[in-house]
Image (spheres, rainbow, N blue to C red):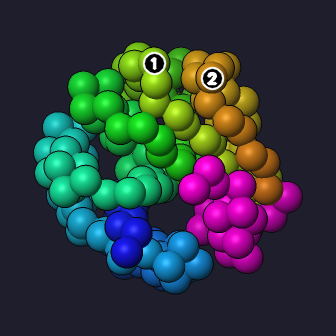
Amino acid sequence: MTRLLFVHGAGGEDDDEPLAEEFGALLGATLDMPRIPSDDMSVEAWAGQIRRSLGASPDLVIAHSFGATVLLHVLASVPFPAATLLAMPDWSASGWDVPQYEWPTVPPGVSLTLHHCRDDDVVPFSHLALASAQLPDAGVVEHPRGGHQFDGAVVEVVASMRL
C-alpha cells in the first residue's frame, strides 16, 4: 500500500486534517500526518518531526503552507525524490520578509511541484510567482479556486501528481 506523508501548516493540526484525509483517500494511501504543535514555530522544531517522518520512507510527500516551507529546509539536507507543495508562503523580502524562514537551496534531483489557488485568502496568490522564480525547476500548477484549503481542488492536485 502507498504511504503518504502530509505535513500540515502552522496551526493546522486540526484544520488540515480533512485536507490530508482527502488526499489519502483519493491516492488510496495510508496517511501519516504528524501533529506538530504551533507552540514553537522555529524551523528546527518542525524540521525534527519532518525528518523522523521521512525516515519512515513514505512513498509520497505533500506539504501545506508553513509545513511546505519547513519541508524545503529539510530537503536541503535530507533529499527525497519528489514533493508536492501547497499554498507555500514566500518569506523573502519580496514576500512576507521573515528571513528565518527563507528557503535554502534544494539539491538537484528533488522534483517539486507548487500548487496555489487564486482565491487563497491566507497566502497571497502572488507568492506562487515568487516561489516559482526561486525554484525555477519546480512544476507550477495554478488553481482558479479552492482557497487556502484547496476546497474542491484536491482532485485536480492529485490528477497532476506524477505517481
Q: Quadrant of the C terminus?
A: bottom right
Give the residue at the far right of this rendering. 144
**Element carrying mark 2:** loop
Above or below: residue 108 compared with residue 62: above
* Nearest to the observer: residue 111 or residue 74: 111
47 above or below 57? above
Q: Residue furthest front?
A: 1
Query: Looking at the picture, how far across and down is residue 44, in whole percent?
Result: 17, 37
| Residue lying at 19% horizontally and 45% vertically, measured from the top left | 51
x and y percentages locating residue 91 in the rendered image: 48, 29
The answer to whether any part of residue 50 appears in the image is no
> Is 155 included in the stretch rendered in magenta?
yes
- The answer to whether 137 is drawn above or below residue 5 in the figure is above
Residue underneath mark 2 = 137
Q: Image quadrant of residue 108?
A: top left
Range of magenta residues = 144-163
Residue at (71, 38) in percent of width and height: 140
Q: What residue do we see at 65% from left, 20% from top?
A: 136
Within the magenta stretch, is there residue 153? yes
- The residue where tag 1 is placed is 108
